Image: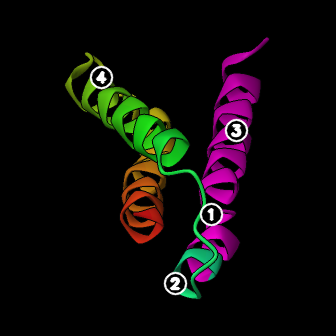
C-alpha cells in the first residue's frame, strides 16, 4: 500500500474505534436506570485503551491516530464500569 492509502486506512480505523466505544452509551443508560451490566469488560477495555494511548503518545514518531482511536475507550470504559457497580 502507498503511504496515502495507509494514512486513509488509519483514520478510517480511528473513526470505527471511536464508534465502538461510543456504543457503550446504551449500556451506561441501562446501568443508570438500574439494569446493571457486567463491569469487568469495560474496565479491561479502559485499561487496554490506556496502554495503547500511552504507547501512541510516546512512540517515535508519535502515532496520533492510534492514540486518538483509543482515548474514548478510556472515558467510556470507565464511565460504563462505574455505572455498572
* Residue depicted at x 50% and y 47%: 42
Foreground residue among 84 and 9: 84
Residue marked by disc 4: 55
Structural crowding at the residue carrying mark 2, measured as other residues with C-alpha within 10 Å and reported as few (<14), some (14–19) or many (≥20): some
Percent from the top left, x then y, of residue 79? 40, 66
Closer to the camera in the image, 85 or 77 = 85
Question: Mark number for residue 32?
Answer: 2
Of the image marks 3 and 4, the number of the one nearer the N terminus: 3
Q: Gap between marks 4 and 1, in whole Å?
A: 24 Å
Q: Please name the residue that numbered disc 3 is placed on.
A: 13
Compared with residue 51, is residue 19 higher up or lower down, i.e. above or below?
below
Q: Nearer the viewer, mark 3 or mark 1?
A: 1
Instruction: Give me the C-alpha separation between circle 1 and circle 2.
Output: 12 Å
- Say which residue appears at 77% left-offset and 27% top-offset: 5
Element class at badge 1: loop
Residue pictured at 66% horizontal, 19% vertical = 3
Spatial distance from mark 3 to mark 1, Cα to Cα?
18 Å
Q: Quadrant of residue 77?
A: bottom left
Q: Relative to 2, is 76 on the left or the right?
A: left
Highlighted magenta segment, given as a residue range? 1-29
Question: Which numbered disc flags the more N-terminal residue, 1 or 2?
Answer: 1
Residue 66, image x, y percentages: 47, 34
Give the prevailing secondary structure in the magenta stretch.
helix
First of labels 2, 3 by sequence position: 3
Tell me, yes or no, whether the two marked residues, 4 and 1, touch with CB atoms within 8 Å.
no
Q: Which image quarter holds the C terminus?
A: bottom left
- Check if residue 5 falls in the magenta segment: yes
> Residue 24 — which label?
1
Residue 22 higher or lower than 39, as above or below: below
Q: Where the N terminus falls, by quadrant?
A: top right
Amino acid at each position: 500500500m502507498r503511504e496515502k492509502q495507509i494514512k486513509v486506512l488509519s483514520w478510517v480505523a480511528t473513526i470505527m474505534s471511536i464508534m465502538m466505544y461510543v456504543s457503550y452509551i446504551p449500556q451506561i443508560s441501562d446501568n443508570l436506570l438500574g439494569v446493571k451490566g457486567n463491569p469487568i469488560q469495560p474496565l479491561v477495555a479502559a485499561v487496554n485503551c490506556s496502554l495503547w494511548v500511552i504507547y501512541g503518545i510516546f512512540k517515535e514518531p508519535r502515532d496520533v491516530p492510534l492514540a486518538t482511536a483509543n482515548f474514548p475507550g478510556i472515558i467510556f470504559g470507565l464511565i460504563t464500569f462505574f455505572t455498572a457497580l
